[in-house]
Amino acid sequence: MVDQAAEKEWPKLEPIRTGLRGRCPRCGEGRLFQGFLKLADGCDQCGLSYDFADPADGPAFFVICFGCVPAVTFALMLEIWTSASLLTQLLVTGPMLIATCVLPLRPLKGWLVCSQFFFKAGEGRISRPWSPYGAGGPQVQPPKRRW
């Protein structure tokens, strides 16, 4: 018996909309996450397997660059300008660090996973002979196709 979900035509959903909400990149209804950051095995609505997904360190990189660095800079400047007490630092910069470093991880990971599905991202492959060290160097041959 053929899987009916595989035969159905799915609308092209924007990765930004589905990813930020933590929804399935194919149907937009199923859950993408099993926990806070752990991806589910697959969609509970359409049956899409999330085995293709590998966001690696992408979400952490974006959070470090655009969240952690400004938050830590603010904490340092608060200390330099006001000589803030430890309690002030904890009450002001603690929530700021959580808001800018922890909370964006899930939506960013969802966006990257949905973008991988939308753009059919995969591991790079060599399609023709390639000379990484120039014309006089060794040539890397593409693998033989098995189909």
Image (tube, rainbow, N blue to C red):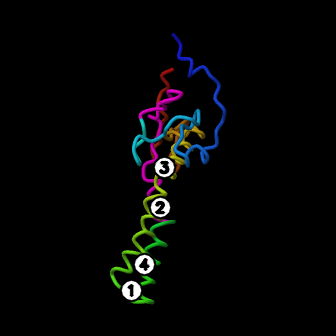
Q: Residue at x 49, y 57 (%)?
A: 104
Badge 3 marks a residue whose secondary structure is helix
Q: Residue at x 54, y 40 (%)?
A: 23
Tell me where residue 27 appears, x and y as whole percent.
59, 33
Say what amino acid the circle numbered 4 marks: Ala
The label number, if any, that marks residue 63 in the structure image: 2
Q: Quadrant of residue 26?
A: top right
Q: Nearer the viewer, mark 2 or mark 1?
A: 1
Q: Residue at x 56, y 35 (%)?
A: 29
Q: Earlier in the sequence, mark 2 or mark 1?
A: 2
Mark 3 — residue? 109
Alpha carbon distance from label 4 to label 1: 9 Å
Q: Nearer the viewer, residue 147 or 135?
A: 147
Q: Earlier in the sequence, mark 1 or mark 3?
A: 1
Q: How many residues crowd around disc 3 within 10 Å: few (fewer than 14), some, or many (20 or more)?
A: many
Alpha carbon distance from label 2 to label 1: 26 Å
Say what amino acid the circle numbered 1 marks: Ala
Badge 2 marks a residue whose secondary structure is helix
Q: Earlier in the sequence, mark 4 or mark 3?
A: 4
Asked if residue 57 lies in the magenta stretch, the reply is yes
Q: Nearer the viewer, residue 125 or 106?
A: 106
The label number, if any, that marks residue 84 in the structure image: 1
Q: Nearer the viewer, mark 4 or mark 1?
A: 1
Residue 138 shown left or right of residue 13 in the figure: left
Start and end of the magenta stretch?
A: 41-65
Are circles 3 and 2 on residues that touch, CB within 8 Å?
no
